Image: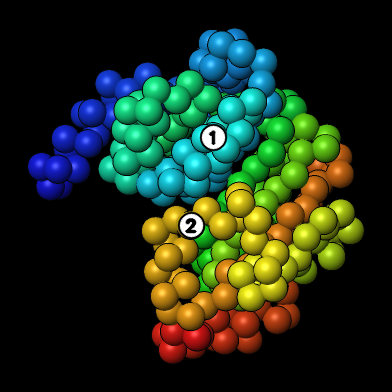
Amino acid sequence: MGKDKLRRFRENLTFECFVQPEFEEVFRQDHPLKGHWNADFFHNDHPIVLELGCGKGEYTVALAERDPDRNYIGIDIKGARMWRGAKTATERGMKNVGFLRTRIEFINGLFAESEVAELWITFPDPQLKTRRAKKRLTAPLFLERYARLLRPDGAINLKTDSKHLYAYTNEVIRRFGLPCEVSEADIYGSGHADEVLSVKTAYEERFLGMGLPITYTRFRLDGRRDFPWFDWEEDEKLEKDDEEARKAGH
């Protein structure tokens, strides 16, 4: 492991906005902050918004800057990447930003029923291989996790360059009859990108440079809790199309 990465790991632990639970604190049990993020971490009663797979935390910080009346938490397992967002938030003295280093699979041990107002999923790994479909962050198994912590009216936002993940997510929405507010296949080409959607992560800048359209989907679970698994017959075809598009850069 490089010295710079080790330095970042050590510095993360000095940031008040950074939480790094031990494995034993979240594996099959509840973390002390579960149900207490407002009172014990943010010290206010503002709504909590999560960014899942936040990477360097650019989007988490940008959203928090634009909306000081909400609390934002970026979640990822890559501590060296999250260091950038945590350091920026610390340097700017931002009080409505937190970073949580953990696996998203453990999320229900960290947030209580209806503790979260909204979710953002920005440029996640699309898990293109059909055999990895259960790892997609909009797959039924993850929706069941989100349903336990989201408020009844809480929205899920997906921003991605992957046509495959975009199509898959829209099929999930259709299969379960979920209310979908926005399904846009090219936010910049259509002019749909507002101030929030125009915030660009490092990944997004790279994808735009390749000529890939950026998609956006916003939907709700509408109080549903059960999301049975299903196999999608279009999976393999779109998997191939998406891989070819990324390789070709269009």
Total marks in image:
2
Residue at 23 percent across and 28 percent down: it is 11
Residue at 32 percent across and 41 percent down: it is 84
- Rendered location of residue 114, percent (x, y): 74, 27
Along the line of sight, the residue nearer the viewer: 193 or 109: 193
Residue at 51 percent across and 16 percent down: it is 41
The answer to which quarter of the image holds residue 139 is: bottom right
Q: Are marks 1 and 2 in contact (CB under 8 Å)?
A: no
Residue at 61 percent across and 50 percent down: it is 196
Which residue reaches farthest left?
3
The answer to which quarter of the image holds residue 4 is: top left
The answer to which quarter of the image holds residue 71 is: top right
Crowdedness near tag 2: few (<14), some (14–19) or many (≥20) residues, C-alpha within 10 Å = some
- Rendered location of residue 191, percent (x, y): 68, 68
Crowdedness near tag 1: few (<14), some (14–19) or many (≥20) residues, C-alpha within 10 Å = many
Q: Kindly identify the amino acid type of the residue bearing the numbered disc 1.
A: Ala
Q: Is residue 78 visible?
A: no
Q: Is residue 71 above or below residue 119?
A: above
- Rendered location of residue 180, percent (x, y): 82, 57
Q: Earlier in the sequence, mark 1 or mark 2?
A: 1
- Rendered location of residue 53, percent (x, y): 49, 48
Along the line of sight, the residue nearer the viewer: 226 or 241: 241
**Scheme of image coloration:** rainbow
Q: Which residue is mark 1?
A: 64
Q: Is residue 240 above or below residue 111?
A: below
Question: Is residue 175 toward the left or the right of residue 194 in the image?
Answer: right
User: Mark 1 to mark 2: distance in Å?
Assistant: 14 Å
Question: Could you say whether the residue bearing mark 1 is in a helix, strand or loop?
Answer: helix
Q: Kindly identify the amino acid type of the residue bearing the numbered disc 2.
A: Lys
Along the line of sight, the residue nearer the viewer: 242 or 118: 118
Q: Which residue is mark 2?
A: 200
Q: Is residue 90 above or below residue 76?
A: above
